[in-house]
Amino acid sequence: MPSVSDESFRTLRPHHPHHFEFESVREVPDSHAWPDVHDHPSVEPSGPDSVPVVDLASPDAVLRVGRVCEEWGVFQVTGHGVSSDLLDRLESQIRRLFSLPTHQKFKAARSPGNISGYGLAPISSFFSKLMCDVIEEYKEVMKELAGRLMHLMLLSLGLTEEDISWAGPVRDTGDLSAVLQLNSYPVCPEPDRAMGLAAHTDSSLLTVLYQSSTSGLQVLRPEPARWVTVPPLPGALVVNVGDLSHILSNGQFRSVLHRAVVNRTRHRLSVAYICGPPAHVKVSPVEKLVGPSEGPAYRAVTWSEYLGLKGKLFNKALASIKLPREEWGDCPCSN
Ligand SMILES: C=C1C[C@]23C[C@@]1(O)CC[C@H]2[C@@]12CCC[C@@](C)(C(=O)O1)[C@H]2[C@@H]3C(=O)O
Ligand SMILES: O=C(O)CCC(=O)C(=O)O
Ligand SMILES: [Fe+2]
C-alpha cells in the first residue's frame, strides 16, 4: 500500500502511480487509507517509555551503547560533534528541495535499481551548488560518526578490529558504505488514517537519523506492544540498530521495528544515513559471540543479497535466514 512519504526523494519515479498531492485534499483517499494505523496504542515518551539518550562524550559511552542496543535497538546520541549549524543548513536545503514543483522533482527521478540517494548527474542541474555542498559535507560527517558508532557497538560486544577486519581499525572510519534517504511527510488532513512510512526494520548495520522538530518517528516496544514516540531533541541524532548488526551480534543486538506517522498541521522531514558493510563482504554472526553449544543463529549474507531478500519478503527477511535450531551446533544440549 502506498504511504504518504511517496515524496521520499530516493523513491521518486516519473509518473509514479502512487504520488499524491496531499496539500490539495480534505480527506485521505482510499488509495492511501491504512486500516492498521492503530494496530497498537501510541504512547508519548515518559519514564520507562523514553528512548535512551547516550552522550558519546561520556566515559561510559561503550557500556551504555551496548546496553541500549540490546534492550532497545534505538537510541538518541548527543555529544556527537556534528555542528548545529550543519544540521540547520541541511534542513533548510532539503526543505528547498522538497518545495520544488512536483514536475521539477520528477525530472530528478532515479532509474529503477539505482539506490543512491542524491548526486546523479540529472539531479545536479536542479539545485544550487550550496545544496550539493551541504549534502556532501553531511555525508562526510555522517561517515565519520557512523564509523565511531559502529566501533562503539563492536567494542561493547567485546570485539576488536581483528574480529571484523572490514570495519577498519578502531577509531578509524573503516570501510563502510552508505545510502542517504531524504524523507518528506506532507501535512495530512486525517493523520489517523494514513501512514508516513510503514513499520519496518532497516537492513543496515546502523542508521543515523536526523529528524526535523516535528515528531513522527515511533518505535515498537514489546509487552504490551506499543508504539513509543522518539521525540525530536534539539541537536540530537537518532541511531537505529539494523538487521545486519542483529545478524553480526548473533541476535544480541536487536534491530528495531519503527515507522513514521504523519501530522495534521506540520510538514515533517527526516534524513536517514543508512550505513552497511562494503558490498562484497558477507556478514555472519561473529564466532566469538556464538556459544560453543549454540552455533550461529543466522547464515551469512552480503548487504545486497539481504536487500534482495528484503525486497521479496519485507519484514520476514531476517527470519528467512535464521538457521534451524539443529544446525546451531552439535551439542545435544542445545536443542
Ligand atoms: C540500501 C537501502 C536500504 C533501504 C533500501 C535501500 O536500497 C535504499 C533505501 C532504504 C529504505 C529507506 C526507507 C525504509 C526502507 C525499508 C525502504 O523501503 O527504503 C529502507 C531500506 C532498508 O533498510 O531495507
Ligand atoms: O522519518 C522517520 O523518522 C523514519 C525514516 C526511516 O525509518 C528510514 O528512512 O528508514
Ligand atoms: Fe527506517
Image (cartoon, helix red, strand yellow):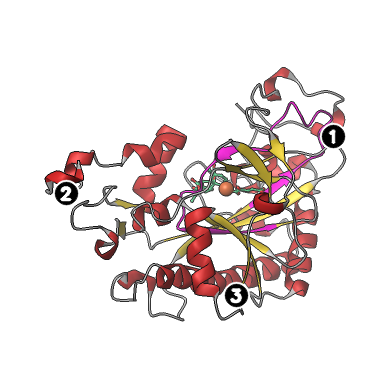
In front: label 1 or label 3: 3
The residue lying furthest to the top in this view is: 30
Which residue lies under the disc numbered 3? 56
Q: Name the residue located 76 percent from the left edge and 72 percent from the top edge.
A: 84
Q: Can residue 120 be seen in this view?
A: no
Q: Does the magenta stretch include residue 197?
A: yes
The local crowd at label 3, few if under 14, some if 14 to 19, many if 20 or more residues have their Cα within 10 Å, is some
The label number, if any, that marks residue 329 in the structure image:
2
Residue 319 at what x, y percent from top left? 36, 38
Residue 239 higher or lower than 146, as above or below: above
Q: Name the residue located 80 percent from the left edge and 39 percent from the top edge.
A: 263
Q: Name the residue located 75 percent from the left edge and 64 percent from the top edge.
A: 128
The label number, if any, that marks residue 23 in the structure image:
1
In front: label 3 or label 2: 2
First in residue order: circle 1 vs circle 2 = 1
The yes-or-no answer for disc 1 within 8 Å of ligand 2 is no
In contact (CB < 8 Å): disc 1 and disc 3: no
Q: Is residue 311 magenta?
A: no
Instruction: Please report the bounds of the magenta region as a residue range.
Output: 182-210
At label 1, the amino acid type is Glu
Residue 90 higher or lower than 313, as above or below: below
Local secondary structure at mark 3: loop
Q: In which quarter of the image is residue 131?
A: bottom right
Local secondary structure at mark 2: loop
From the viewer's perspective, tell me whether residue 333 is left or right of residue 75: left
From the viewer's perspective, tell me whether residue 305 is left or right of residue 236: left
Residue 277 at what x, y percent from top left? 40, 62
First in residue order: circle 1 vs circle 3 = 1
At label 3, the amino acid type is Leu
The quadrant in which the N terminus is found is top right
Q: Is residue 66 visible?
A: yes
Cα distance, mark 3 to mark 2? 37 Å
